[in-house]
Structure formats: structure tokens, C-alpha cells
Amino acid sequence: MSCEHCLRFVTSGDAQIEVLPWGPHEWLARPGLVDAERLQLVRVTMPPGCAHRFHRHPCFEELLYVLSGRIEQWVGREKRVLGPGDVAHVPRDEVHGSYNDFEEPCVFLAILSENRFDGPAVIDMSEEEPWSKLRAR
């Protein structure tokens, strides 16, 4: 399936901006912007004190690559503090969460696959056991 008006080269000015509670998302590759068969790419700037609380993506896996700042990243029940150059892999449908408890914004890339799917993209798990008790608010 071809996208007649899709881009081959995407500049920051071409990015599709989406403002979410855990920070602005600059979509650099997604259906309708590029003609990628399976991939999506978004640059997220998460301000201090913000979080994308525990959630899962039933239809795709994800790579998170930190460009600047730090983030407390959970994948399942395991957590790490990630900094510039660090990567987290989140398998399809794995519960994960990103928390910026630091004093500076964290900028990271999220690479997602698939880009065309049925069903919800994100399911919030933060109020369900054991996720609701894993991390103090």
C-alpha cells in the first residue's frame, strides 16, 4: 500500500506534533507521513516530574533510545536509570513505564513496530496489580 503524498526525507519542520501529558511527541515516521511498512519513530521530550506510567502496547514492540537527560525506565518488573546513548527494548505487550524524577528534561527516541494494527495502541496498567504498588507516587 503506497502513500502518494508521503515523504522520503523528514525534517524537524515536517514532524507531526502531538502533546500528551508526559510531554510533546514529534512524530518523524508514522503512517501518512512516511511510507514505512512497519516502523514508527517519535522524539519525546519528557519534562522533569512527568511520567508515562505503567502501560503496554498489545500490537507492537518498542526501542527507547535516550538522547539527553536521564529517565527511570521499567520493562516488566526490572528498572534501570538510562542516560544518553542507552537503549531499552520493550517486547510486544510487555508492561513498561518511563519516569523523569530528575531536574532536567529527558529527550528520547521511541522506535515502534508495527505501524498498522487493529485495537488500542496503549493500555494503561498503572492502577492494576502489581504495577500500582511497584513504584511510590
Image: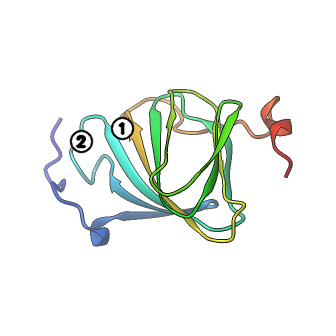
Residue indicated by mark 2? 36
Q: Are marks 2 and 1 in contact (CB under 8 Å)?
A: yes
Q: Residue at x 48, y 56 (%)?
A: 108
Q: Answer above or below: position of 38 versus 16.
A: above
Classify 10 Å Cα crowding around label 2: few (below 14), some (14-19), many (20 and above).
some
Q: Quadrant of residue 1?
A: top left
Q: Quadrant of residue 77?
A: top right
- Amino acid under disc 2: Ala
Q: How is this picture coloured?
A: rainbow
Helix, strand or loop under label 2 = loop
Q: Calculate the distance from the C-alpha at mark 2 to the C-alpha at mark 1.
A: 8 Å
Q: Residue at x 15, y 40 (%)?
A: 2
- Amino acid under disc 1: Asn
Helix, strand or loop under label 1 = loop
Q: Answer above or below: position of 94 versus 64.
A: above
Q: Answer above or below: position of 15 versus 132.
A: below
Q: Which mark is residue 115?
A: 1
Give whichever of discs 2 and 1 has the lower sequence position.
2
Q: Residue at x 60, y 59 (%)?
A: 70
Q: Residue at x 68, y 61 (%)?
A: 50
Q: Quadrant of residue 51?
A: bottom right
- For the residue pair 71 and 49, the one nearer the viewer reads as 71
In x, y percent, where is residue 46?
A: 58, 63
For the image, the number of numbered tags is 2
Left or right, 51 with respect to 35, comes to right
In x, y percent, where is residue 54?
A: 69, 41
